[in-house]
Image (cartoon, coloured by chain):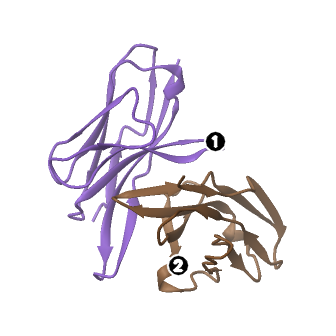
Chain colours: A purple, B brown
């Protein structure tokens, strides 16, 4: 199993450009998440999808949109990139372990720079 | 307000010394707390969860509801413990709140 995969790994955008970050998981998890990681601020939730067909805002949704394409895929779109969106973006999925505990599984991250 | 506080951005200890990474939380409900770790060039992964009361890689963490804390401890730090550690609070409703993280550096 590949777990959670993200593309691209690195991206440089100019202010105003758009792009979509792709995420896929092969663990048959219902819930998927997008976080951004900034120095001194930890991980902040951008959007999440509790199940296929649903999406909800997290702590910092402004400037982003998401699509839960199917159970496997959850994409994050920046319509008009701004320098404040320079960050490392992590996708995660959440599943149950042995029907007792849930755990989030993270992708390798996408390092985005907006100039 | 729901919040996770990790007061130390950087913690530096010598190999073999005890280490304690602090985590305090604010939550009105029954908390479910986790520690996640990110080693250099690796993805973020779960280290341990309070509900299972387990010891992973020599680390333990006890939930203290009176002090609203979930500190991570290890009696003898190893160089391979050097990493970024995040305390996380699962609030239900599919949301997990992460602290700002503490970078642990274990010196030889």
Q: Which residue is mark 2?
A: B50
Q: Nearer the viewer, residue B78 or B17?
A: B17
The image quadrant of residue B83 is bottom right
Which circle marks residue A12 in the picture? Answer: none
Identify the residue shown where x is 66% and y is 76%: B66
**Disc 2: CA contacts within 10 A as few (<14), some (14-19) or many (>=20):** some
* Circle 1: element type: loop
SS category of the residue bearing label 2: helix
Vertical placement of A54 versus A86: above or below?
Answer: below
Subunit ID for the residue under disc 1: A
Q: Please provide percent x and percent y for residue A55.
A: 25, 44
Q: Is residue A45 visible?
A: yes
Residue drawn at x 37%, y 18% is A80
Q: Residue at x 58, y 85 (%)?
A: B55
Q: Chain under label 2?
A: B
Residue lying at 30% horizontally and 83% vertically, measured from the top left: A98
* Up/down of B56 relative to A74, above or below: below
Structural distance between the alpha carbons of marks 1 and 2: 26 Å
Q: Position of residue A47 (x, y in %)?
A: 35, 43
Camera-side residue: B39 or B49?
A: B49
From the image, tell me which residue sits under label 1: A39
Question: Are the two marked residues, 1 and 2, in contact with CB atoms closer than 8 angstroms?
Answer: no
Which corner quadrant of the image does residue A38 belong to? top right
Residue B91: horizontal and vertical position, in percent?
43, 62
Residue A53 lies, with reference to residue B74, above or below; the image says: above
What is the crowding at mark 1: few (fewer than 14 residues within 10 Å), some, or many (at least 20)? few
Inspect this view and state whether residue B38 appears. no
Instruction: Using residue B100 as the reference point, say whether residue B47 is left or right of it.
Output: left
């Amino acid at each position: 199993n590949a777990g959670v995969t993200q593309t691209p790994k690195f991206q440089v955008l100019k202010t105003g450009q758009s792009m979509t970050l792709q995420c896929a998981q092969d663990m048959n998890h219902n819930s998927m998440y997008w976080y951004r990681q900034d120095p001194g601020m930890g991980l902040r939730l951008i959007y999440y999808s509790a199940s296929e067909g649903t999406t909800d805002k997290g702590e910092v949704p402004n400037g982003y949109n998401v699509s839960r394409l199917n159970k496997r895929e959850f994409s994050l779109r920046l319509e008009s990139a701004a320098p404040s969106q320079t960050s490392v973006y992590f996708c995660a999925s959440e599943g149950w372990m042995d029907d007792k505990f849930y755990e989030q599984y993270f992708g390798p991250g996408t390092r985005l720079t907006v100039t | 307000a729901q919040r996770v506080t990790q007061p130390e951005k950087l913690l530096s200890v010598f190999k073999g010394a005890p280490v304690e990474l602090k985590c305090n939380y604010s939550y009105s409900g029954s908390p479910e707390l986790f520690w996640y770790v990110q080693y250099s060039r690796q993805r973020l992964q779960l280290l341990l969860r309070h509900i299972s009361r387990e010891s992973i890689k020599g680390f333990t963490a006890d939930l203290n509801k009176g002090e609203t804390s979930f500190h991570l401890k290890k009696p003898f730090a190893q160089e391979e413990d050097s990493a970024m550690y995040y305390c996380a609070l699962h609030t239900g409703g599919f949301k997990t709140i992460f602290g700002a993280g503490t970078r642990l550096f274990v010196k030889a």
